[in-house]
Image: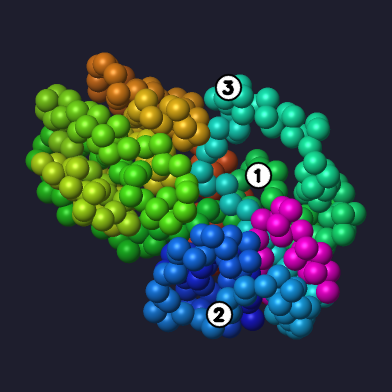
Amino acid sequence: MKCLYIIGARYDLKFHATYVASALSAGHEVEVWETMDIFTPVSAKKYRPDAPAGACPWKSFARLESLSRAIGQVGKDVLVINLLHYDKCTHAFYKACKKFDGVMISFHPKNCPLPEDSLRNMYSRDFSLRALRKNFGSLNKIKKTVALSSSSPAELVGVRSVNALVVNSVRPRKSCYPIGPKTRMIMVPSMDYDEFVRWRRSGSPGSGIVPDGRPLVAYIDSFSPRHPDYLRRPGHRRPITEEGLYPHVRKLLEKFKNLGMRVVVAAHPRAQREGWLEYYDGFELVQGKTLPLTSEADLVVNMYSTAISFAALLGKAILTVTTDEFETYRLGGIIRHYAELFGTRLINISGEYDLDPGMDMKVDAERYRRFLEEYVVPPGVNMELTFWEQLLPQLEGLLTDG
């Protein structure tokens, strides 16, 4: 099978590992088209990662006309996996996609809770803004609404519908890709679930932490002012500061230690020592072993990392924490929604608070089940197979049917 990815970012190590490596290992031919220079030119100039080892062929388009012309020349034997969201910038490209007579699909994962998933956690000003846009939006907004309705074909606004939309939730969000009545919905687990499957297949190895009899608290390091996803966005407002985050985190971890509990930090996979991990000096730390550490923990402390899904899969107790800075930013809504989903306490560690291990060790199994169905493993999918092991046969079937 020949696969062509059309992406709005750079073909970097993360994209290769997430989307390309599995298709290559299955023996498929893969090509990647980058469009960052067209749709996000300012960021493109700042973000030029090294090519991943074992990379497949790729092209980088700098002009919309060239990209639109190229899509019309793709053969029907190629499966086009289009990861460009539909908006006013990409409308012209999706219009050009009408020239492509083959099979085109899009991925629409839902692996991170957002504030709008819960009306109770929605900022009133955000709600009002969305209502205004919905009811009095520009022509482009009206076009987008029509094009993304499953009951009305995207062709009504001059673009083509994708043949299939890959989702991982019993309640997928409104699509940001052109769909229509004939768009097939393919249900698979989230890509994050792959790590859990591979870990179990390898015998569920441990983190290397030697038990010492004390209850183990795992703190998931999920955000830093130096996170690459934020540093690479020129002009992006970074409201989370070192001084507004790490002193409060250290105070929290010290409180657990004073209660006779053992604290281990699960460092972010892309964490750097300078300006990031140095703030955890004095605490035990593991990197690249968040899942094994979670399996050994008695309590998992999280802000908004999607790695918390491992705790839900393993039935571990969860405590959700936030700070004053997070609460002034959209991420505060995500954190609040996490607490609601799991039925956990939400502690603002910027102020005064007391820890109650007895209360925080409780697990609401029904809430965990609903969380997993909505964000990780929807009912009906094979829980023993990875994302790609379930998806690739269906993609092959789409080409055959097409």
Disc number lying in front (1 or 2): 2
Q: Which residue is mark 2?
A: 58
Q: Which mark is residue 172?
A: 1
Helix, strand, or loop for circle 3?
A: helix
* Image: 290 above or below 347: below
Helix, strand, or loop for circle 1?
A: loop
Q: CA distance from mark 2 to mark 3?
A: 44 Å
Q: Which mark is residue 120?
A: 3
Answer with left or right where residue 322 lies relative to residue 353: right
Seen at 54% across and 60% down, the residue is 42
Check residue 90 for magenta coloring.
yes
Marked residue nearer the N-terminal end (3 or 1) = 3
Seen at 40% across and 74% down, the residue is 50
For the residues labelled 1 and 2, say whether their Cβ atoms are less than 8 Å apart: no
Residue range in magenta is 79-99
Q: Badge 1 local density, few (<14 within 10 Å), some, or many (20+)? A: some
Q: Quadrant of the C terminus?
A: bottom right
